[in-house]
Image: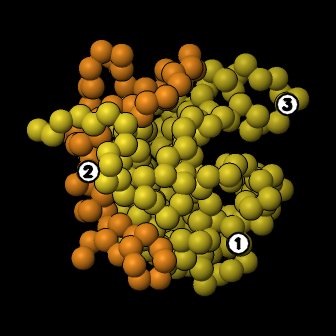
Amino acid sequence: ASKPSKGIAPQSHALEHSWTFWFDSPAAKSAKTKQEDWGSSIRPIYTFSTVEEFWSIYNNIRHPSKLAIGTDFHCFKYKIEPKWEDPVCANGGKWTVTFPKGKSDTSWLYTLLGMIGEQFDHGDEICGAVVNVRNRQEKISIWTKNAINEAAQLSIGKQWKGFLDYNETIGFIFHEDAMRHERSAKNKYVV
Amino acid sequence: SDKDGHGHGAKKYSRDFLLKFSMQFTELPEGFEIMSDVAEILNAHINTSPSIDYDSL
């Protein structure tokens, strides 16, 4: 077995972007009153910029199957907040894949590795990803910047399904529609 | 090669390449702040020894 590393090794592998893990816990959410912005309990945990730092964090945080019901866990490019109101996200949208409870761990990891390893042809379009742990299912979404750029969204959706070996149809929802129509928002693209 | 750090300026790493490092970095980065509400998402025994569930990788 390899010796555990302390801090960043001398020959660390820099990532193209720095990324920030954020989380929103059920406890924090319930402590908020309904008048407050739903996203106000989201907070950053750590920003990483090397492969080594990524693993140092990932290996010490719970994977989706072990997170409390109601948790939202995000990994977004540094300086992009995982909120609709963020100027970079405001005109964006998201692809979402769903899994039965406890079955998203591998796909969550592969989503993170695909993003931080810049495996998407339209990686510049990506804001980040989030996993929502709920009672009956776990959902992973990739948020993108320019929802109307159909070619880029379709490319990301198709590549993502390939990375996850996910065979069901997935849909892309504009944040604008999600804000207006909440759960009844319709898919604008499917792959 | 797995890594293409010279092509078009983007630092690309394949999944297999990234996974090679997964077992080597098991301690939290120095300076990581464990606030009370963050503790709930950390694996148990964080202050004693690394306790990593590699079965799920």
Which chain has been coloured orange in this picture?
B
Looking at the rendered structure, the secondary structure element under dot 2 is: loop
The spot of residue A106 in percent (x, y) is 33, 50
Element class at badge 1 = loop
Letter of the chain shown yellow in the rendering: A
Q: Are marks 1 and 3 in contact (CB under 8 Å)?
A: no
Q: In the rendered image, is residue A112 in sight?
A: yes
Mark 1 residue crowding within 10 angstroms, few (<14) / some (14–19) / many (20+) = many
Chain letter of the residue carrying label 3: A
Q: Residue at x 42, y 52 (%)?
A: A50
Query: CA gap, disc 1 to disc 2?
Result: 34 Å
Quarter of the image that includes the N terminus of chain A: top left
Residue with the mark numbered 3: A36
Query: Which is nearer the N-term, disc 1 or disc 3?
Result: 3
Judging depth in this view, the residue of A32 and A97 nearest the camera is: A32
Q: Position of residue A146 (x, y in %)?
A: 71, 72
Q: Would residue A110 be visible to someone looking at this image?
A: no
Which residue does the numbered mark 2 point to in the structure image? B21
- Distance of mark 2 from mark 3, alpha carbons? 42 Å
Count all numbered tags in the image, as a single digit.
3
Q: Which residue lies under the disc numbered 1?
A: A147
| Disc 1 versus disc 2: nearer the observer | 2
